[in-house]
Image (cartoon, coloured by chain):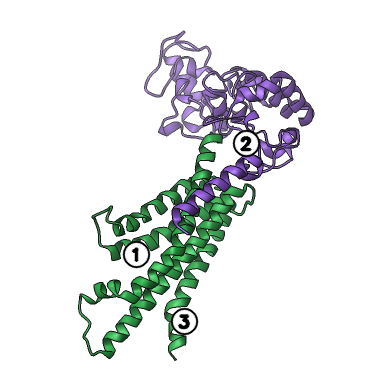
Chain colours: A purple, B green
Amino acid sequence: MRASVVGLLTLAACAGLVVVSPRRALSPGPLTRGHGDLGERCLDCHSAFRGPRPERCTACHDAARFARRAASAAGAGSRARAILGLHRARASADCLACHTDHGGPDPARATRRFSHDALGPESPPCADCHADAAPRDDLHGTSPGACDACHRTSAWRPATFAHDSVFPLDRDHAVACRTCHDVAGDYRRYTCYGCHEHAPGRIRAQHAEEGITRDLDRCVRCHRDTAGERGEGGGD
Amino acid sequence: MPHRSVLARQVLPSVAAYVALVLAAVLADRLLHAAGLAGVGRVLGPVGTGLIIASFAYSLRKRKLLRLGSPKALLELHEVLGWVGALAILVHAGVHVHALIPWLAVGAMLVVVASGFVGKLLLRRAGDALRAREEEGGRERDPAAERRRVLDAATVDVMKRWRAVHMPLNAAFVVLALVHVVAALMLWR
């Protein structure tokens, strides 16, 4: 038999198969239980040449109700609150950034790995989802809502704090945090008397020569770096 | 022991290459899943398709639709690209039996690859037979021997009969693969 005839017969067989049962012909896997009744109606979710569209999801699903049900399924606590916060922020956005299907009847297998990139440029404040997870210590308490100044969405750690904006940690000051921040968890408090170079008696004597006798524990008020010093009231 | 020699020199390497194709695909699939890189399989679909399309340069050269390259070199390239392309497609398919059309396409591809190995075997056997006849006739081998072998009437006849099977199989594979690609482009984003 000629190749062209075989090709045409194969094409006709494929077309027949797609018409009779598009699910058996093309579906990459079983739908979730909730979508099971869609059966052969692929185009209820998929648009030709555009794939599955979020507007097809919201044609059936009320985003807010969907979020409450998902949070309820997640139970109590921070995870449920995160799910609610996320859905509230993304109520009218792209469901398919996180949800998928054809992974089997279990709905838990129909979610992609969450990526904060899916939130887009108009992402909600971190606390909308992570309010329970925010640390309560003084450092974090002084900068609510500014998580992204030090942390990235890929992981809480490593975090970057721009110490240079307060006091540059040059070669002589590359020490463990607790050398200066001697009260655990309180990073607003510090002492410069944690090393031999800054012995209290010596510092007191040096400053007395210049008539400075007050606030000798608030070094950074004048000494913003190791090169020199600012005048009184140079800012705190 | 001429039969054992034919088996060792011609049949076994082809069978080994075919078995290696399947084993390499299973191994690559397992490794990608273990490394959490199963998504790479999706990319391997277009890659394998591209390699197989590139391997058709030999067919174009044979039909004089392509003027570049020697047919012998392009045939060797056809074999290599066909094997590597088939490997990429097998890894792309994974071991997930769901939709019929893509799986029929994979099945057709495996049959076409097997048919390709049979064609290679037939060509080699015909070449060996011609060489034997030349040696019996006392003719020395010369650079033109390769060309005479290709033109040898017996070889042409055998290969013509083989192509009558190989090309329809290939047509079925190409159509099934095309339907799968068009469906994926239509329904996937």
Residue B16 visible here: yes
Residue position marked by numbered label 2 in the rendering = A112
Residue position marked by numbered label 3 in the rendering = B7
- The lab-note entry on whether marks 2 and 1 share a chain reads no
Q: In the image shown, does A188 or A158 lie closer to the viewer?
A: A158
10 Å crowding of disc 2: few (<14), some (14-19), many (20+): few
Q: Name which residue lies at 53% across and 59% down.
A: B25
| Vertical side of A195 occupied by B61: above or below | below
- The lab-note entry on whether marks 3 and 1 share a chain reads yes
- Marks 2 and 1, how far apart in space? 43 Å
Q: Name which residue lies at 41% across and 30% down.
A: A170
Q: Position of residue A209 (x, y in %)?
A: 42, 15
Three-letter amino acid code of the residue under disc 2: Arg
Quadrant position of the N terminus of chain B in the picture: bottom left
Residue position marked by numbered label 1 in the rendering = B76
| Vertical side of B61 occupied by A232: above or below | above
- Marks 2 and 3, how far apart in space? 51 Å
Three-letter amino acid code of the residue under disc 3: Leu
Q: Secondary structure at mark 2?
A: loop
Image side of residue A141 versus residue B168, left or right: right
